[in-house]
Amino acid sequence: MTIQSIAVLGAGHGGLAAAADLSLRGFEVRLQARRAAALEPLRAQGGVRVRGVCDGLAPIALLTTDIAEAVAGADLVMLVVPSGAHGPYAQALAPLLTPELPVFINPGHTGGGLHFVRELRRAGYDAPVRTCETVTLSYICRKTGPGAVEIFSITKKLKFAAFPGRHLAELHALIAPLYPEITPVSSVLETGLTNINAVFHVPGMVMNAGWIEDTGGDFLFYAEGITPAVGRVIAAVDEERMAVARALGVPTASFLENFYQAGLTTRAAMLSGDISRACKESAPNAAIKSPPSLDHRYIHEDVGYGLVPFAAFGDLAGIDTPTIDALIHVASEMTGLDFAATGLTLARMGLDGIAPDALVRFVEDGA
Amino acid sequence: MSAAPVKRIAIFGAGGGGTSAAAHLTTLGFEIRLYSQDESALDPLREIGGINYDAPFGEGFAALPVITSDAAEAMDGAELVMIVSPAHLQEKWVRAAAPHLTDSQVLFVSPGHTLMLIPHVLRDAGIRHPVFCETATLPYLCRRTGPTTCRISRVSDFMVFGGFPGRETKRLHEVVSTVYPSVQPFSNVLETVFPYGNAIHHPPAFLANAGRVEATGGDFRHYYDGITPSVGRLIDAVDRERLAVAAALGARTMPFVELFHRMGYTTDAARDTGLAYEAFHQSKPDRWIPAPPELEHRYFLEDVPYGHLIYSELGRLAGVATPTIDHVIHLAGVALGRDLRADGLTLKRMGLAGVGRERFLELLENGFED
């Protein structure tokens, strides 16, 4: 089969970008938002205003707050929401999914598909399921106003995996026409453990917490905030992440290699081994300001659905992750939120009690 | 041991604290003998025969009869030997003083807050039954502003004071209070470890502003701008762990915010919130203090290995978990690219490796038997 109609669930930065891009490329887009207010400007202007890698007013076939209506007749469900919303969306989709309808989680970050399927099962869906995911969003984009989005670039060489993994080839063939940049990798463990946002956002936030709150984020997050000391903490997180991946037999590459491969820094910076320099020499990130507060996805998502599952995989593999643990704890004390309890633990990925050597089979077979 | 009235005081250390103490105590009529091993710090003072001061009690020149790098000369005839140095230099100063220390002299370390380090060093230097006393904090808010000048912004009106062995605290307090009436006797040198405020708030605040320090060279106000609500919450978490360790060892202390208020640094309204953020945001004395220009600074280099680390080590001894403190130690070390535990004040370095809680408390109160 080929995909013609796509249910895009979520109308934030990524959802709007995907809706506009796919619509302008001839797909039927059925866009769902949790809040009706988010859809009003789209109704008023007749679609999504987009500029950047594509330009124009992209018509959207269906605008709705009703997930069932969005999904009805779609060939693909594409979930473009913060990781914290994967659970509620899984519960809502449980009565609507069929074995024929694949789910594309864009992005899955770390453990997105595992978490989504676990929540589907908990909500009573017991038929076969096919999910696939990217590690990060397929666009670098920002909402620029009501119903308007700017797409700065399409993410390059985007790691893509399926859960259960045995559906990879088939799902890759299905999604590649939408996103030619996706690159299939061994499993959702490989995409999940390549989540570089978690590696560098959290040290950047924790070690600039005072600056962020004092100025409302009035500095350049990457170009100024990732100083040599912050870079050293990022490097320590990265070492721990790679040690976990190696212990689980998952292919891995360093933050700098991934950052360079994604087109986000210079070759000279990558070769220097200096993470602070690589961030300063990141042209796509050069003008990106800091978040205005710690109440932001760089903390909520990248701690709860990045560092917490990294540490969980470390526990599973018997690898110590002292720097990751320290950042989870410090971020929790700063925000008053207990990320170790609310984030993506082994139990919430359906992996509690699993032996390391059974993990590879589980992500392949889904059981 | 007799408690002769204090007239002559040897001061070890010619930095901001040492020169300020020399100036202040001279104005009070004591005879000061200033000692340092750093000739370049002493030479300008020798040339003018003393130190110029600018202080709440006036501006002027304090003539110092002895300025020397000879410890024996400095200590000759002194009733009180006062060590005023960063924590990491205390061991060096105590080793210099130990061979000349007499039974009638009182050894006073201000600030001390290094727990059993000094008794351990004195034992190592051949003094079987060491006696000394200390305060938790420096008596002054001060700086050495030039080769021959110091500025004192504030003379402390409350200092937590303890002696070793603890049963000697009362006698030692009677001596030191004739010099510093604001010293308040507590049980022992465990109770002087906990109220050292810098050790509580500098490491977490510095960690949470590390990027800004490096990006701007410290171009912001460390306390007023840098300690935001989230940073304050991290300090509060450190403080809860410190209080739990103190409680488990039966040491009297008070929450940081109360201590800060008691020392005159913040408002009643801020104290009533119990929040570090409010305490600093409403602190007049700290309001304009700039951030350090780099991370290679005592806020990490002293207050982690001689501050946070002691709480962590005491927590281990007392069986109390200190996760926030331990995580801050770890992240500060990674940020600096070095192991801050390795050079720090561990139980081992204080001769306390393998010592249990009961034996530790017994040592604090009664000292060494052998």
Image (cartoon, coloured by chain):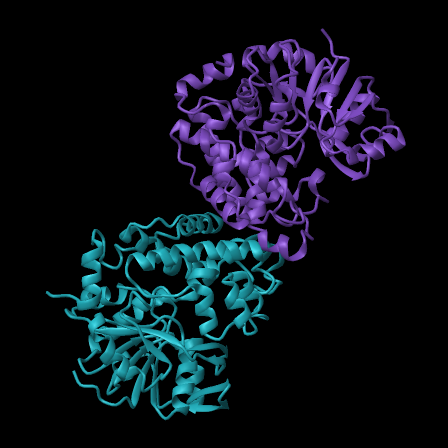
Chain colours: A purple, B cyan
| Quadrant showing the C terminus of chain B | bottom left
For image coordinates 27% across by 84% down, the residue present is B175
Residue furthest bottom in the image = B29
Q: Is residue A251 left or right of residue A91?
A: left
| Quadrant showing the N terminus of chain B | bottom left
Residue furthest left in the image = B370
Q: Residue A115, relative to residue B200: is it above or below?
A: above
Q: Is residue A342 visible?
A: yes
The x, y position of residue B44, in whole percent, is: 45, 83
Residue furthest top in the image = A1
| Quadrant of residue A316 within the rendered picture | top left
Q: Is residue A229 left or right of residue B307?
A: right
Q: Toward the viewer: B103 or A108?
A: A108
Q: Toward the viewer: B11 or A293?
A: A293
The x, y position of residue B239, in whole percent, is: 43, 58
The x, y position of residue B13, in whole percent, is: 37, 76
Q: Is residue B236 left or right of residue A87?
A: left
Q: Is residue A199 visible?
A: no
The x, y position of residue A220, in whole percent, is: 68, 48
| Quadrant of residue B224 within the rendered picture | bottom right
Q: Residue A352, relative to residue B77: is it above or below?
A: above
Q: Toward the viewer: A30 or B151?
A: A30
For image coordinates 42% across by 86% down, the residue present is B24
Number of on-image labels: 0
Q: Residue A20, relative to residue A38: is it above or below?
A: above
Q: Toward the viewer: B57 or B297?
A: B57
